Image (spheres, grey):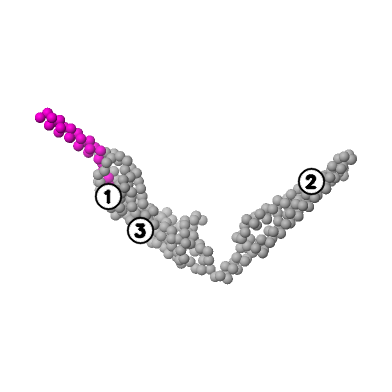
Amino acid sequence: MKKLIMLLILSALLIGQAQEKKTTLTIESIPDQIPIRINSVLIGNTPIMKYEVTSGYITIEAISNQAGIWNNYNIVQEIFTTPGQDTTIIIQFPKMIKINSVPFHAKLLVNNQFLGLTPVSVDFTQYRGKEFLLEKTGYKSFRFILQNQSSQLYTLEPLDLATIKEEKSSFTYGLFHSRMKTKFLFLTGTVVTHWLAFYFKNLADDNFEKYSTTGNPALMQKYWDNTQKYDRWSDITLGVSYAFLGGLIYTVLWR
């Protein structure tokens, strides 16, 4: 009899401990009917009411109910549950819309930020009311403001070939778009060498003035040698400066 009583008490303690390690989860989502995994096990679609789990750390994954690229937006949360307490989780998915273009693979930008090549999925709540820019070589740039919650498709207008040729052959286009590194090199070389020519010429003039005013024969020879040396350096750097300037003019006007 005593053994039976002890066995019943032990069973009650074990059952009580097992119940204390259990907890329940209530999971809701916006929108609803979202598939839910708990610790990688699919348990059903939201809303899920008072689902019993073992207490402790639990990984919840809400699976986007859209196909294809939308699956990139699955939401994963890790929570800690307390034994004997119901935990309520509300998961909200962003309102994603797709922006596409004809032809596709156009650059999509907002505030000079590159978002990707069309088709691109964006969060409507985050970008609502902002101005977007679509760009593709050979087509006119297209601007639009995101206001509609449905997916967007824009047709880009081709550029006239004569207009493209005229634009690329213009002075402005050649100055700011073509061979920028070469032009920067020629411009920098022109400025630096011209400044050096001016600097050497000043040194030559200073030494000639000293040569003209000193009465020491040894110093006169020194100042005269320096005058000739700095004059030569001034002529050389001035010639190099003109060469750089010629290269700059050539790249701007004929390249």
The residue where tag 1 is placed is 43
* Furthest-front residue in this view: 3
User: In what element is the residue under mark 2?
Assistant: helix
Going from N to C along the chain, the mark reached first, 2 or 3, is 3
Amino acid type for the residue under numbered disc 3: Ala
* Furthest-left residue in this view: 1
Residue at the spot x=74%, y=49% of the render?
196
**Circle 1: is it few (<14), some (14-19), or many (20+) Cα within 10 Å?**
few
Q: Nearer the viewer, residue 228 or 129?
A: 228
In the image: residue 212, left or right of residue 92: right
Going from N to C along the chain, the mark reached first, 1 or 3, is 1
Task: Name the image quarter holding the C terminus.
Answer: bottom right
Task: Look at the numbered discs 2 and 3 and tell me whether their residues touch, using CB distance below 8 Å.
Answer: no
**Circle 2: is it few (<14), some (14-19), or many (20+) Cα within 10 Å?**
some
Residue 2 part of the magenta segment: yes
Amino acid type for the residue under numbered disc 2: Leu
Query: Whole-Å distance between the Cαs marked 2 and 3?
Result: 77 Å
Query: Whole-Å distance between the Cαs marked 1 and 2?
Result: 88 Å
Camera sees residue 205: no
Task: Name the image quarter holding the N terminus.
Answer: top left
Residue 151 appears at what percent x and percent y? Answer: 40, 62
Residue 57 part of the magenta segment: no
The residue where tag 3 is placed is 67
The residue where tag 2 is placed is 203
- What range is drawn magenta here? 1-26
